[in-house]
DNA sequence: TAGATTGTTAATCGATTAACAATC
DNA sequence: TAGATTGTTAATCGATTAACAATC
């Protein structure tokens, strides 16, 4: 007696695809981040308990999140790191390559361009802009393929030609809203804001603002009490 | 008929103090971050709806979080920004000054040292370390009081003399665990990790690892679906 | 007054936790 | 086999949402 079940990849029997809830998608992203790092450290398998320590997500919750999509683990052993990375990528549909435009060629912009945090997950910084004309043309980023800083006037063309899906703002607070407005105008829907500015955008645009100070206040509270 | 209630500052009638739940403390920190920024932008009052847009926390949740500690708002008007900042600081007990040691004088370290994100919340970078002897003595940070990069050998003394409560790691992945171990040894309980390393620390030490790539994967999922 | 927004309740939903049989 | 860890259930807790009277 076989019961009719939802396919395991999240698609429904009618061919439509069920969206993950906000919480599940956020947690799966974090598991993927830790797994990628664990793989770099040479780990072959990882237990839900270990994942819990690094993600601060309850281990039962992790097992349940994963078991909703299939039986990925081995009892007594844990999860195979490689195969779990593949499974989560499939669930999140983020196996592809996605292009980023970076704004601001100051210390922070240089730090981001030189890092490989984004590259490991298929994000590639393909253009760096700065409104300081003295910086235009300057090569940024170490490694084999440094990028030359481009003029802000090229923005519209670059977004289209390079299929930019994410804009990363490493600009001063006063410049952030202007860049955000331009990105919105040219159709970019995801903005990563490393400035402190509170950005105003239409409802179909996602803004993620990095707030290390808020994270620190939170950690400090539990230290002080 | 007056009923006996818990005092509004979170202390109990027996003098002990009730700890906020993890969720409440995290959300209050984010409200504070947005309020601080709103104040800089010259806003006098802010509604729970506006706070919700910037924090991505439900507006009813915000009103309830706040009303648990007192009636801070004015119906039809919203919350006074200045006074709410003061109230939340009191609740989080983070009105004081706290000292940070920064590790790594590369692009990221320079970006952090030059920024005022931490300063606005009472955190002060009081020492910068780098193991590269060529960098020792180099002045870092703009503004009136740049700091000279210190030798890593001074770490133990600086942690004690300067009362360091937070260590911020802006070092390469391979160096992160070593610095974390030393910080733990000298008694620092809060570590902010901007490297990708998965840090091993004792249970009484809090590690916050910044994962912009995971945040991006999450945003991308909802863009792609 | 009229419009706006808080403070609060009630219903629903999702996360957390403990526990444990299944099984590697 | 013995030890470990998954997959899963059930109970509890906290977050979300809608709704609305109170009131500025």
Image: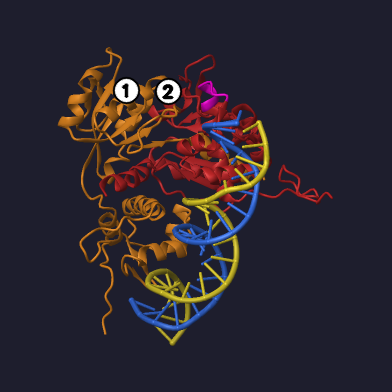
Chain colours: A red, B orange, C yellow, D blue
Percent position (x, y) of residue A201? 52, 50
Residue at 30% from the left image edge and 39% from the top image edge: B116
Q: What range of the chain is rendered magenta?
A: A38-44
Q: Is residue A119 above or below residue A93?
A: above
**Distance between the Cα atoms at labels 1 and 2?**
14 Å
Asked if labels 2 and 1 touch by Cβ distance under 8 angstroms, the answer is no
Q: For this view, does B107 lie left or right of residue B213?
A: left
Residue under label 1: B105
Which residue is painted at 57% across and 41% down in the image?
A: A28
The residue pinned by badge 2 equals B173
Mark 1 nearby-residue class (10 Å; few <14, some 14–19, many ≥20): many
> SS at mark 1?
loop
Q: Is residue A12 visible?
A: yes
Q: Report the quarter where the C terminus of chain B lies.
A: top right
Position of residue D16 measured from the top left corner of the image (x, y, whole percent): 52, 60
Q: In which image quadrant can residue A109 be found?
A: top left
């Amino acid at each position: 007696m076989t019961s009719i079940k939802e396919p395991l990849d999240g698609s429904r029997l009618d061919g439509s695809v069920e969206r993950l809830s906000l919480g599940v998608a956020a947690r799966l992203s974090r598991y993927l981040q830790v797994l990628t790092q664990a793989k770099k450290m040479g780990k072959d398998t990882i237990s839900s308990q270990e994942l819990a320590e690094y993600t601060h997500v309850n281990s039962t919750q992790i097992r349940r999140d994963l078991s909703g999509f299939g039986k990925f683990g081995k009892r007594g052993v844990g999860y195979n790191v490689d195969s779990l990375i593949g499974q989560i990528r499939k669930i999140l549909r983020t196996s592809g390559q996605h292009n980023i435009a970076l704004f601001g060629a100051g210390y922070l912009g240089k730090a981001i361009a030189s890092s490989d945090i984004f590259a490991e997950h298929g994000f590639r910084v393909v253009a760096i802009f700065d409104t300081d004309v003295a910086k235009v043309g300057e090569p940024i980023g170490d490694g084999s393929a440094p990028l030359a800083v481009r003029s802000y006037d090229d923005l519209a063309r670059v977004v289209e030609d390079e299929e930019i899906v994410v804009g990363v703002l490493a600009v001063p607070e006063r410049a952030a809203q202007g860049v955000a407005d331009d990105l919105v105008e040219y159709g970019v829907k995801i903005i990563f804001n490393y400035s402190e500015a509170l950005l105003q955008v239409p409802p179909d645009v996602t803004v993620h603002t990095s707030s290390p100070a808020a994270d620190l206040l939170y950690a400090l509270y539990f230290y002080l009490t």
